[in-house]
Amino acid sequence: MTAQEAARLVESSGLSHIKVGVADIDGVMRGKYLRKDKFLAALGSGLAFCDVVFGWDVDDQLYDNGKYTGWHTAYPDAKVRIDPATCRRLPVEKNAEGEEMLLFLGEFTGAAASVCPRRLLGRLVDRAADMGFDAFAALEYEFFMFRETPDSVRQKGYRGLQTWTPGNFGYSMLRSTVQGGFHEALLTMCERMDMPIEGLHTETGPGVLEAALGVDTVRAAADKGFLFKTFCKVLAQQHDLMATFMAKWSHEHSGQSGHIHMSLRDRKTGKSAFHDPADEHGMSATQRAFVAGVQRCLPDFTAMYAQTVNSYSRLVPGFWAPLDATWAVENRTTALRVIPGTDKSQRVEIRIGSADANPYLALAAVLASGLYGIEKQLQPSAPVQGNAYTQKFAREQRLPSTLWEAAQRLKASETARDCFGNEFVEHYAATREWEERMFRRHVTDWELARYFEII
């Protein structure tokens, strides 16, 4: 959709206001309603948005260590460009006449572009194009569902929560049929919002689902992941349920992944840059270099795949999450899983990502490191054979085990600064350090149970 088409759509609608959303550093959608005339003006000239969205955390607590914005800058307005191509109808929100709300996504321009997650990914898409590639991606999300409300979880102190369904029912036809009403509502909403689900099934665990979103260009795929997580939660709450994309909500159950599938296509020929039927497993030289780059950069870029303190509760042995920067062909115990196929399906799956990751940053990390591998003509290590969890690997392949360590690795990485810019690396690392410091100010239930009486 062009700006002119978007304007005609808005003008012809019966809506008095239009929604505009942007992504903050954590991947939370922030936004506002704009009166129709204000929105139409903003389509051409942009709009102002307080840059505090890059100056606070997920709890709206102001960072005390940020350089980009803060009390020292007095939180000025930043410019936002509305992307007309992101227009969506919202079947979950209608006006009094029954017309669905319109939503558009925006991205920051000017100085704020240096720390804007969507703009960061856009710069890497442009870089790929300059190298002769179009990048494509698809996201998979696991998420737990609860028979709770925002009020009830707070009243319970987030303890003793009632899961949507009991027991371990992976790929259950029983559960999906009995709960077919919500499944159908979710599938329909995603179709209506141009983020179709290719596969939806129950996973092993009480009330856990996995949704595989359809493949698209990498920026559109990030938009779809961003929209999916937000409006899946909206739809759940409208059904008196709650969905969480935490990396790990209980030590009794597996973590929740946000796996990434990515491939490149040659801009001149339109053919897969990853597929070469003459090579082993169909892996072209370009795919091998791409995999090598992602593997090389994983330890330095971990903070962009695993962005919360909670993310690292998932990265422990035996829970379907990788601990080292490893790769193999069709192996789900490694960080990178090469999936052989045809010109259309040859790809690599990045399995380190958790469901809580900002999709723009996670996809930016993959694309940047893969392009780095191609530029440097890197070669991956030998592929893992068998169970990677039971094997020892080189020290430099070990992934950070805490958010603080991951932030230090990112901040010290020259490759990260070359790929993402100094402003982004400094700002993002500072926000992750803040997140870790906030965690360390609190006493956990585990500490109380372990030390209260005996020590």
Image: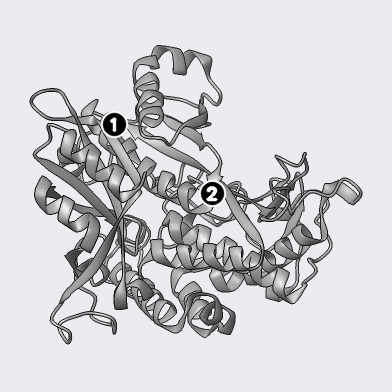
Q: Nearer the viewer, residue 329 or 393?
A: 329
Q: How far is mark 1 from mark 2, CA to CA? A: 28 Å
The residue where tag 2 is placed is: 217
Res 194 → quadrant:
top left
Q: Nearer the viewer, residue 445 or 55?
A: 55
Residue 375 image position (x, y, % from top left): 70, 74
Q: Classify residue 397 as left or right of residue 442.
A: right
The residue where tag 1 is placed is: 236
Q: Quadrant of the N terminus?
A: top left
Task: Identify the image's colour scheme: rainbow, by chain, secondary structure or one colour.
Answer: one colour
Residue 393 image position (x, y, % from top left): 75, 67
At x 68%, y 65%, the residue is 295
Q: Classify residue 147 as left or right of residue 122.
A: left
Residue type at the position of mark 2: Thr
At x 34%, y 36%, the residue is 232
Q: Quadrant of the C terminus?
A: bottom left
Task: Say what secondary structure mark 1 lies in.
Answer: helix
At x 72%, y 69%, the residue is 374
Q: Is residue 242 above or below residue 58?
A: above
Q: Classify residue 161 as left or right of residue 194.
A: left
Q: Earlier in the sequence, mark 1 or mark 2?
A: 2
At x 90%, y 51%, the residue is 279
Residue 127 image position (x, y, % from top left): 57, 68
Residue furthest bottom as drawn: 72
